[in-house]
Amino acid sequence: MAWLAAPEYRLARELFLRLLALVYCCGFLAAARQFRALLGSRGMLPIPRFLARVPFRRAPSLFHWHYSDRLYAAVARTGLLLSAALLAGAADLLPLGAAMALWALLWALYLSIVNTGQTWYAFGWESLLLEAGALAVFLGNDRVAPPLLVLWLLRWLLFRVEFGAGLIKWRGDACWRKLTCLYHHHETQPMPGPLSWFFHHLPRPLHKAEAAANHVVQLAVPFALFLPQPIASDAALLMIATQLWLIASGNFAWLNWLTVALALAVLDTGTLRRVLPIGPDPHYPGQPVWYRVLVAAYALLVLARSWQPARNLVSPRQQMNRSWDRLHLVNSYGAFGSVNRTRYEIVLEGTRDVHGTDGWQEYEFPGKPGELRRLPRQFAPYHLRLDWLMWFAAISPSYARPWFLPLLARLLVNDPDTLRLLRRNPFPDAPPALVRARLYRYRFTDGPELRATGAWWHRDHVRDHQPPVGLAALRRHAPPDPTARPAGRDSTRHPTRHPGEDR
């Protein structure tokens, strides 16, 4: 069974697991800091309501046995501590079985969060983290050589991520085939970063070169992952380069970082020796029989569950970012099958006067465009969930209906959990009497405009998204009194995809 061991991938395993642990840290940190306003008992989409409608078999989660905000916080903080320990190398200090159990616990904790996260967690990178995290359980630690079967499964995952994204673009918006999508993408993407203004103003021939390179890397290069070394490593390096380009150009949570981690798992020590002074591969003792059995069994399970994702890839009706099982073990991926030509933003405002004559003041978000002179910030791999969903709300008001009015209701009572998700509350002393939402068309300024005004953005008012409304009209959407006895559970819809998710 020596062929199952691949000691030449020891550094690849280490790089992958450390970066995966870092991504887990970001996921659990975001959960710990944001859940009360989004999903808590007094949140916009409360988990207790969701659990009342959706049974365990449809959304496995430990919260089906018991839910409280205190337990959710404990789960998120425990996950954060465990992922930090794994990032520091704790798994290599433990026996093989204990290290596997640690990774499995981390996966189970995050699965419990994702499966009750509803709209706030309906992103492809959540499934990607869970699928990669499940594979990490079987990668072992320094006490055994990396298992070849799991390394190949990581390549299969990386192939689906890249090839799925390439196919959804080619089959989707015609601007990808015309190589013109990047005329608009850097400006209209969900949450631009600090360099997005500069990427947007690159010469159009370079934008076409970007799009063409994207097609090559996502549609042709993935097949090279299954070729002998060093071809497979060279393919992975090309993918890493394109992912770093995407990281520099915008905020896509941990999608790009996790793709980089998967690509790092392809690099053998022969490739790494080109740039690093690496000694010979160590001699590992034989893998325990029970470990080989578990690895082989899980590989067979993944192959069996790969039928639907593989069929989806070749289907002309390809679906993107879909989970084919409730455990998110084997999924379908894709990104930006269509690209918006115009950027719309919802701006929330409040006033102290019930007649609206006292002037309207804007709420500011940490990540989404708002104040015109503020350069977009870099947040990825951290994920600002409310900022992202505000982008979807501007695209599809009906999609945002379950949580948008509850958001306004919480602004009308200065809900502290909700205000912690914002950058600036213009009413720190007392809540506003009225709030409203206005829809604007945003665009990047050009060079002369930036120099003349200091503004990175220009905006034009389109219409009122939500007319002025007070707390009395939104009373049923307001957070319940925390001192009151909990009411009976009611139902909440559990959407699995965002409208415009192929954007």
Image (cartoon, rainbow, N blue to C red):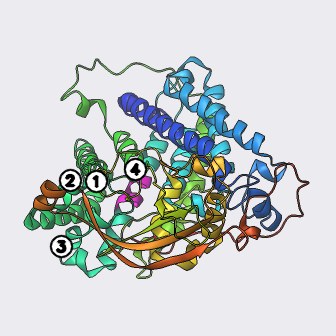
Which is more N-terminal, label 3 or label 1? 3
Q: Earlier in the sequence, mark 2 or mark 3?
A: 3
Mark 3 or mark 4: whose residue is earlier in sequence: 4
Tell me if 311 is positioned left or right of 355 in this view. Answer: left
Which residues are the magenta region?
Answer: 156-162
Return the mark for residue 179.
Answer: 3
Residue 157 is a magenta residue: yes
> In the rendered image, which quarter contains the C terminus?
bottom left
Location of mark 4 (residue): 155
Task: Name the amino acid type tagged 4.
Answer: Arg
Q: Which residue is mark 1?
A: 373
Give yes or no for contact between labels 2 and 3 (Cβ–Cβ under 8 Å): no
Image vertical order of residue 437 relative to residue 66, above or below: below
> Between disc 1 and disc 4, whose residue precedes?
4
Q: Is residue 288 above or below residue 266?
A: above
Instruction: Tell me the element at label 3.
Output: loop
Q: Say which mark, if any, is on residue 454.
A: 2
Distance between the Cα atoms at labels 1 and 4?
43 Å
